[in-house]
Image: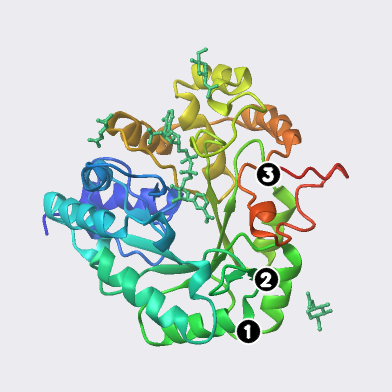
């Protein structure tokens, strides 16, 4: 390992600011990943013939955290990209933080073991750093859905004990579900992954997690930019004049402002892009420094309470009960 004191001290600084995340050009191999790198790379909707190239490029750009899921249907290609990225950078598996998620069709006392087994094989890794329960929803063999998480969580605890994943987490839980889970387990979730962006800040909900020592990761951090969402309302975040003005003032791009906003709150962000320029641009969010007054201006955008990802209706289950009605105006999107 080639080291110099200069690299070491820069790496230590980066660790202090962003956990183990290393800005471009720093020697990532010097760090141990006890903590999740706060800027990760999302893989939902990566498709076509250059999925592996995109993932490999992300690693070459500096991302050390890859967010995957069984349901994304691309874990084999993502896995090839991880292998290629490690080869091209000379890094090893331990230098990366790899997250995946258990799909709704693998809930229950035994299925999680086969869920993680398939994911590990497809990704081509021996262990995960984090395994999320994707939703508190069990999809029955004949298609019906129900809220279920206690048995599944207990089974995920066994995966932790077997060393198949270093941490377990939840995703898309509502407050009652999370409190109930905490009341029924010896393994509190390390991380809760949920939709978060300037149009859906969920500040009180994040505070609950801080109190309970649960880290929060924000998904869809660019707010509705993903083409599977109905992004007709409100104005696309990256086109919002407040965001654009701040970007201009701070020498950042609108996407970097959205991501820096998420990092400034202590949450991690996992933007997805299949384009090299945007993959690099998004990683540059680590260098985008927002000021207090920028954050104040962005706080007002949160009044939109706009949630893009809510499958309640199509799955016929109640999700997000008690959330996004901070001002009493409960809004349900579909
Ligand atoms: N736990 C869950 O239930 C859950 C739900 C949703 C998402 N997630 C995770 O979170 C990740 C991120 O969320 P997301 O994919 O929904 O949305 P996102 O990362 O907020 O946005 C992705 C979209 O924005 C575009 N984009 C990316 N960077 C851009 C830039 N700099 N300028 C302009 N456009 C840009 C991408 O297009 P191109 O690719 O064409 O560049 C893509 O269409 C997912 O990939 C997934 O890993 C988890
Ligand atoms: C993947 O292919 C698309 C479509 O040709 C292209 O726009 C994009 O830049 C490519 N991405 C990478 C990482 O090669
Ligand atoms: C969790 O347990 C506490 C203490 O027993 C109780 O007050 C609370 O109502 C429980 N919460 C849920 C959601 O079950
Ligand atoms: C943002 O604005 C540009 C330029 O006016 C437009 O072409 C684009 O469609 C807008 N994006 C969204 C997602 O509305």
Indicate which label's residue lies in the foreground, 1 or 3.
Answer: 3
Residue 4 in view of the camera: no
Q: Residue 93 carries which label?
A: none
In which quarter of the view is residue 328 placed? top right
Precedes in sequence: disc 3 or disc 2:
2
- Residue name at image x 11 percent, y 59 percent: 1
| SS for callout 1 | loop
The alpha-carbon separation of the residues under discs 3 and 2 comes to 18 Å
The alpha-carbon separation of the residues under discs 2 and 1 comes to 17 Å
| SS for callout 3 | loop
Please name the residue that numbered disc 1 is placed on: 185
Precedes in sequence: disc 2 or disc 1:
2
| SS for callout 2 | strand
> Mark 1 near mark 3, Cβ–Cβ under 8 Å?
no
Please name the residue that numbered disc 3 is placed on: 334
> Mark 2 near mark 1, Cβ–Cβ under 8 Å?
no
Q: In this view, does 290 lie above or below 132?
A: above
Residue 273 image point, x, y percent: 37, 38
Q: How is the image coloured?
A: rainbow
The reply, left or right, for residue 63 in relation to residue 140 is: left
Residue 67 image point, x, y percent: 40, 55
Q: Is residue 216 above or below residue 243?
A: below
Q: Which mark is residue 147?
A: 2
Residue 160 image point, x, y percent: 43, 81
Q: Which of the two residues, 288 or 203, is positioned nearer the viewer here?
A: 203
Q: Which of the two residues, 18 or 238, is positioned nearer the viewer here?
A: 238
Q: Count residues near mark 1 (Cα–Cα under 10 Å), then give few for <14, some for 14-19, many for 20+.
A: few
Ligand 3: does it lie within 8 Å of the C-beta at label 1?
no
């Amino acid at each position: 390992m080639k080291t110099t004191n200069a690299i070491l001290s820069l790496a230590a600084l980066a660790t202090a600011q962003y956990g183990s995340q290393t800005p471009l050009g720093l020697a990532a191999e010097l760090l141990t990943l006890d903590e999740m790198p706060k800027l990760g790379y999302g893989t939902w909707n990566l498709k076509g013939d250059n999925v592996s190239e995109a993932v490999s490029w992300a690693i070459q750009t500096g991302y050390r955290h890859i967010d995957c899921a069984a349901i994304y249907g691309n874990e084999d290609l993502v896995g090839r990209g991880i292998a290629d990225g490690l080869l091209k950078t000379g890094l090893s598996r331990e230098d990366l933080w790899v997250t995946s998620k258990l799909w709704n069709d693998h809930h229950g006392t035994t299925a999680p073991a086969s869920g993680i087994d398939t994911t590990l094989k497809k990704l081509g890794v021996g262990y995960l750093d984090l395994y999320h329960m994707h939703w508190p929803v069990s999809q029955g063999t004949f298609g019906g859905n129900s809220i279920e998480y206690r048995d599944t969580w207990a089974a995920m605890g066994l995966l932790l004990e077997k060393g198949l994943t270093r941490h377990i987490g939840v995703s898309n839980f509502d407050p009652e579900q999370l409190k109930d889970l905490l009341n029924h387990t010896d393994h509190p979730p390390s991380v809760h992954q949920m939709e978060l962006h300037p149009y859906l800040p969920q500040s009180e909900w994040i505070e609950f997690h801080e109190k309970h020592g649960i880290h929060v990761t924000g998904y869809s951090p660019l707010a509705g930019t993903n083409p599977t969402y109905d992004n007709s309302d409100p104005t696309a975040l990256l086109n919002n004049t407040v965001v654009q003005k701040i970007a201009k003032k701070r020498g950042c791009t609108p996407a970097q402002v959205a991501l820096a906003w998420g990092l400034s709150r202590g949450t991690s962000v996992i933007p997805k892009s299949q384009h090299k320029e945007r993959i690099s641009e998004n990683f540059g969010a680590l260098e985008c420094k927002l000021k207090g007054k920028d954050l104040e201006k962005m706080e007002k955008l949160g009044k939109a309470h706009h949630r893009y990802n809510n499958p309640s209706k199509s799955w016929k289950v109640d999700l997000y009960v008690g959330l996004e009605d901070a001002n009493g105006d409960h809004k349900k999107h579909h």
